[in-house]
Image (cartoon, rainbow, N blue to C red):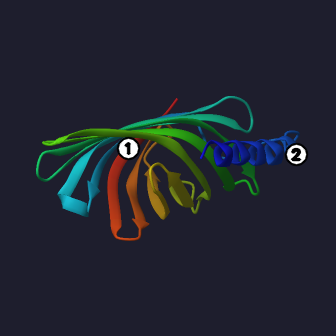
Amino acid sequence: MKNRFIIAVLLLSGAAFAQAQEHRTTALDYTYAELRFVDVDVADGSGLRVNGSYQLNNNWLIVGGVSSVDFDFDVDSLTIELGGGYVWSYTNEFDLLATARIVSVEVDTPFGSDDETGFAISAGTRGLITSQFEVRGSVNHINLDNSDTFLEIAGDYHFTDVFSAGLTLEVAGDTDVISVGARWFF
């Protein structure tokens, strides 16, 4: 598992290094904090997710997040993610984005608890259809005790330069996740 993570990070770093001289001209901002309400269709799960991204320079990012979800039958989960990413601007309105993250998940049940640590990688696009409407799409892979790959599609409406809100749908095998939230840019 560690070897795959190292390979993914090296591939991401190599591709990013090759693009390091690119000048960003996109209208998208990657320094933000986000709060989302999450609804998971498995065992009626719901909770909150806090995400953040900080743009280090023109293309590099630090990303992270914390999710707390409560399920039926007194089952709770806490997920913490921290990693980095790289953005390739291919038009003024659209970017390609890749991230790699360390993921830690703790699940508490009436019969005990368990925790796993692994990695997640994502690749996708983010762009502005109009000056106020943003769309995102990505393929995400997470590897903990088992692995799963899921598709994410999202749309946000930018009410101001520093505030947007929107809807996200994540589809993975037997699990669908819908979240509604807001993003603050700074």
Q: Position of residue 6 (x, y in %)?
A: 70, 42
| Element at label 2 | helix
Q: How many dots with numbers?
A: 2
Q: Amino acid at mark 2?
A: Ala
Q: Is residue 104 left or right of residue 114?
A: right
| Element at label 1 | strand
Q: Position of residue 29 (x, y in %)?
A: 60, 40
Q: Position of residue 160 (x, y in %)?
A: 46, 42
Give yes or no for contact between labels 2 and 1 (Cβ–Cβ under 8 Å): no
Binning the other alpha carbons within 10 Å of mark 2 as few (below 14), some (14 to 19) or many (20 upward) gives few
User: In the rendered image, is residue 55 in sight?
Assistant: yes
Residue 182's disc number: 1
User: Dividing the picture into quarters, in which one does residue 175 lie?
Assistant: bottom left
Query: Which residue was labeled with disc 2?
Result: 18
Q: CA distance from mark 2 to mark 1?
A: 34 Å
Q: Is residue 95 above or below residue 105?
A: below
Q: Amino acid at mark 1?
A: Ala
Q: Position of residue 171 (x, y in %)?
A: 41, 67
Between 96 and 66, the one nearer to me in the picture: 66
Residue name at image x 73 percent, y 53 percent: 92
Which circle's residue, 2 or 1, is located before the other in the chain?
2
User: Dividing the picture into quarters, in which one does residue 63 lie?
Assistant: top right
Residue name at image x 34 percent, y 65 percent: 176
